Structures are given as structure tokens and as C-alpha cells.
Image (cartoon, grey):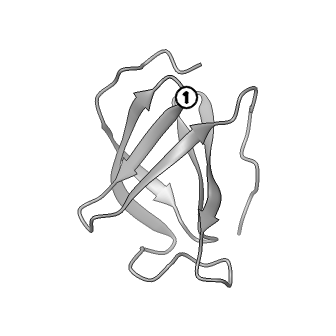
Amino acid sequence: MNPTFPGAGEPYRLYTHCGISEARHRESYYELVPPLHDGNVNPPAGWGNPYQLGTLTPVSPTQVVFTDDAGHRVTFTLRLGATTWKQLCD
């Protein structure tokens, strides 16, 4: 579990190249279900590519929230036992 809860938001560079699906906070991996994409596994309109700059904030022992100045807000849920990314994308 994430030992930083509750925690302050930290600057975060969210990888968006293949859509919005995963985040890492400290040593923990989180996922967005279902992932956000444009139907062709690209970020939705209005998101940066390959990254979106914003803030990642732990909001519970199992969730972190990404927000940015463009008004995006997505909640990622902890992948218990994960030690790496679920999906690697080029």
C-alpha cells in the first residue's frame, strides 16, 4: 500500500502516448479502468502527446488522482503486487 497517504500533490509527467491507462507513484503502480483513448489507442483530444504535465495526489490508500491546468482529472487505482508497468508502449 502507498505509505504517503494522505499526501500532498506532486508535479507529475503522465505518459499519454498510447492513451491514459497507468501511473506510478513512488514504488506503486496504478491503473485507470477503463483507459481513456481516442479509439485508436492515442490520447483523447485535448491531452498532450506523449506526456501531459500536471499533479499526482494520493487521495486514499489505493487511489491517486491526476489533475492539470487544462481541467483534466482522472483517478487511478492501485495494482496490488505490481512491480512494473502493465503495458509498455512505444
- Name the residue type under label 1: Thr
Q: Position of residue 63 (x, y in %)?
A: 50, 35
> Could you tell me how many numbered marks the image carries?
1
Secondary element type, mark 1: loop
Q: Position of residue 50 (x, y in %)?
A: 52, 71
Residue found farthest to the left:
69
The residue carrying pointer 1 sits among few (fewer than 14), some (14 to 19) or many (20 or more) residues within 10 Å by Cα, namely some
Tell me if residue 7 comes above or below residue 35 in the rendering.
above
Question: Is residue 40 depicted above or below 9 in this figure?
Answer: below
- Residue under the point 65% across and 60% down: 34
The reply, left or right, for residue 41 in relation to residue 5 is: right
Nearer the observer, 53 or 65: 65
Which quadrant would residue 79 be assigned to in this image?
top right
At a point 41% along the width and 44% down the height, the residue shown is 65
Indicate left or right for 59 with 16 as reference. left
Tell me which residue sits at (53%, 21%) in the image: 2
Q: Quadrant of the C terminus?
A: bottom right
Give residue 43's position: percent from left, percent from top. Answer: 54, 75
Find disc 1 in the rendering and name its residue: 62
